[in-house]
Image: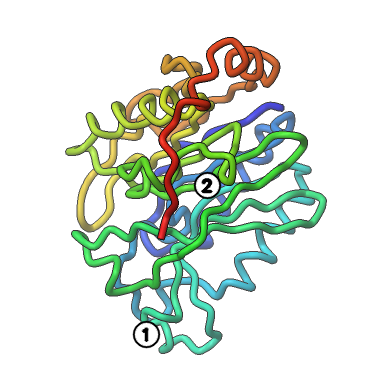
Amino acid sequence: MKITLYQQDIKWLDPEANYRKIESVLSSQRDSDLLVLPEMCTTGFVTIPGPGEIEYFADVEQRLLDLSRRYQTAICGSFAISLSTQSEDCLKPENNRNRCYFVMPEGEIRYYDKHHLFNIGAENRGYLPGQDQCVVTWRGIRFFLIVCYDLRFPVWSKYTERNSYDILVCVANWPEKRQLAWETLLPARAIENQVYVIGVNRVGADVICGYRGGTCAIHPYGHVLAKCPEGEESVCSFTPDMQKLEDFRRKFPSQADSDRFSIL
């Protein structure tokens, strides 16, 4: 499976321009099986959305389905969505989600709603947090979805018998002033869980801060398998070796010694 990571320079509050960018990448990467996009990839990180600043969820789903089918590529990324067709209802946080979709060309849609909202940046004032973890199985590979700030909370993404997966996917708008944390936590999650990790971060700037990217794929040993050039809108790709992952887990079964716990 070829997985392509898009380090996008997101046009602020301009979904149509961003969809055009996404389709351009799909068109240029026709041999990819999966395209991974950043957090809020069609709007930018709008924490307290006003009318017209986020998308209706059904419209997003239909658009992603159309793109996925047309290019025969699965698509994963986060979108700022409203559950209501009434534009002014976005002023009520309970109607809004920071939703990470995984859309498959066969027509199936799965999603994960960001659990750890970035309250420091007032995201909790604009959205309702999700309560459920999400593992998507597609073409024999299990993908665990998280969004940006979730990366800082290892218990949420811990590999367990009930939450077992092969690839952790983290989509983000991670600011450049905290770039070292991004570069440290991605390999930490790979090593501790014995999984591949995909981290897709944006570049450019929004009304709040700048973004340096650091989009990459990490081996379960912790080293980088593929990486986008720093600060540039670009793509990179890699193919996970599932047999090597299985062999590694069998030869070094550290998960068997993990502490038992439950998330309340």
Residue 197 screen position, x and y as percent: 49, 30
Residue 264 screen position, x and y as percent: 41, 60
Residue that mark 2 sits on: 145
Is residue 252 positioned above or below 141 on the image? above
Q: Is residue 262 left or right of residue 240?
A: left
Furthest-right residue in this view: 106
Seen from the viewer's position, the closer of residues 243 and 184 is: 243
Q: Closer to the N terminus: mark 1 or mark 2?
A: 1
Quarter of the N terminus within the rendering: top right
Residue 188 screen position, x and y as percent: 36, 27
Q: Residue at x 71, y 53 (%)?
A: 67
Indicate the secondary structure of the residue bearing disc 1.
loop
Residue that mark 1 sits on: 92
Indicate the secondary structure of the residue bearing disc 2.
strand
Residue 175 screen position, x and y as percent: 25, 43
Q: Quadrant of residue 2?
A: top right
